[in-house]
Image (cartoon, helix red, strand yellow):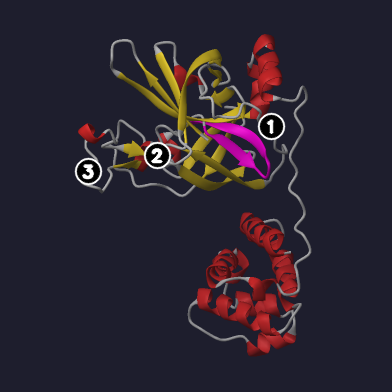
């Protein structure tokens, strides 16, 4: 990920934004971050880290319709490799589905003041800086179709910047990833949507909004495909029979919380109903508790004693939940853990 820093010839502060390096010499970001009035443009990577580097940049093109800009890095340090594999780009199914996504950017609410007393202007170290923000979110694909954006549901930050600003300022330009492909670029935070919603321009929108020569530049410099493939959710791998026994305590609680959120379990006697179709040993021996979260956690610990029963529980949950957003989140969690330990 990249920090995009603009300045003005008048010396006034410009915009801050996010971006992603798509080739050895090119970065994508939002067009509104590098508006025409920006006279100085700088891109920084790994700020205050051992591998930190920065360079000047120029705007190759900036499309207001697509809210997309392609930047060329003009003065790369000698030690920075210029050979870089471009990312994959993809669209999402035009269907009633919800997908798990992630993005990394530099929003305003991540502004920090170093704690060390030596961090003063005369020391050469920053008195304030923006840290990175890695968000895991969910996209309900059929939202925001008219605008041509993806509605990204994320954990909300505190709203401490006042009504005239958004705590998400600076997140614009961050690439939105679904599995191993970029499906959009964060563009705007609509205040009316709440602090837990961001809008990202869909990559599919680029094909409608970019001029022919701009599309050609994206194909040449970012390896954008002439025809956009649709990213499909991979089926969950077969659960290893010993998956639960491999999880550390934090991971086991992560699975617990994902399952506890299922609507079918929040109904009266929901867990008992689900277990009727699973292994009878689980229904008989699972711990009882007034807290559903602790009941689910106890059930998972019971599954550890009986290899193969967890897969049966997951199948039962799928049956009762059908295609709910919550069960998709459970499958997303299990997919990650299965790929880690499988």
Location of residue 254 in the rendering, given as x and y in whole percent from the top left corner: 55, 65
Q: Is residue 32 above or below residue 168?
A: above
User: Which range of residues does the magenta coloring cover?
Assistant: 174-187
Q: Which mark is residue 85?
A: 1
Magenta segment includes 185: yes
Image point (62%, 57%), residue name: 329
**Distance of label 3 from label 2 (alpha carbons):** 15 Å
Location of residue 328 in the rendering, given as x and y in whole percent from the top left corner: 66, 56
Q: Would residue 256 be visible to someone looking at this image?
A: yes
Please name which of the two marks, 1 or 3, marks the residue nearer to the observer: 3
State which tag comes first along the sequence, 2 or 1.
Answer: 2
Residue under numbered circle 3:
118
Q: Looking at the figure, which quarter contains the C terminus?
A: bottom right
Location of residue 249 in the rendering, given as x and y in whole percent from the top left corner: 54, 72
State which tag comes first along the sequence, 1 or 3.
Answer: 1
Location of residue 101 in the rendering, given as x and y in whole percent from the top left corner: 60, 45
Q: Residue furthest bottom?
A: 284
Residue under numbered circle 2:
48
């Amino acid at each position: 990920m990249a920090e995009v820093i603009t300045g003005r010839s008048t010396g006034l502060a410009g915009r801050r934004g996010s971006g992603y390096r798509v080739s050895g010499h090119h970065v994508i970001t939002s067009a509104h971050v590098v508006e025409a009035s920006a006279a100085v443009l700088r891109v920084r990577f790994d700020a205050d880290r051992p591998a930190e580097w920065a360079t000047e940049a120029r705007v190759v093109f900036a499309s207001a319709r697509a809210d997309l800009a392609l930047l060329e890095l003009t003065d790369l340090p000698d030690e920075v490799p210029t050979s870089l594999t471009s990312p994959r780009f993809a669209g999402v199914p035009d269907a009633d589905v919800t997908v798990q996504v992630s993005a990394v950017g530099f929003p305003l609410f991540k502004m920090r003041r170093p704690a060390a007393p030596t961090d003063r202007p005369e020391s050469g170290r920053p008195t304030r800086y923006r840290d990175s923000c890695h968000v895991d979110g969910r996209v309900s694909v059929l939202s925001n179709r008219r605008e041509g954006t993806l509605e990204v549901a994320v954990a909300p930050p505190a709203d401490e910047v006042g009504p005239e600003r958004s705590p998400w300022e600076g997140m614009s330009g961050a690439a939105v990833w679904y599995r191993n492909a970029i499906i959009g670029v964060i563009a705007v935070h609509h205040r009316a949507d709440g602090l837990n919603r961001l809008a990202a321009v869909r990559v599919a929108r680029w094909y409608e909004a970019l001029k022919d020569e701009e599309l050609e530049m994206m194909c040449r410099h970012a390896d954008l495909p002439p025809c956009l493939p649709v990213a499909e959710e991979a089926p969950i791998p077969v659960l290893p029979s010993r998956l639960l026994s491999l999880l550390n305590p934090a991971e086991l609680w992560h699975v617990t919380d994902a399952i506890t959120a299922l609507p079918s379990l929040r109904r009266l006697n929901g867990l008992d109903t689900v277990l009727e179709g699973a292994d009878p040993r689980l229904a008989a021996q699972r711990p009882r508790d007034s807290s559903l979260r602790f009941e689910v956690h106890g059930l998972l610990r019971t599954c550890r004693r009986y290899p193969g029963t967890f897969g049966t529980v997951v199948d039962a949950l799928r049956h009762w939940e059908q295609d709910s957003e919550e069960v998709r989140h459970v499958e997303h969690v299990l997919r990650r853990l299965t790929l880690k330990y499988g």
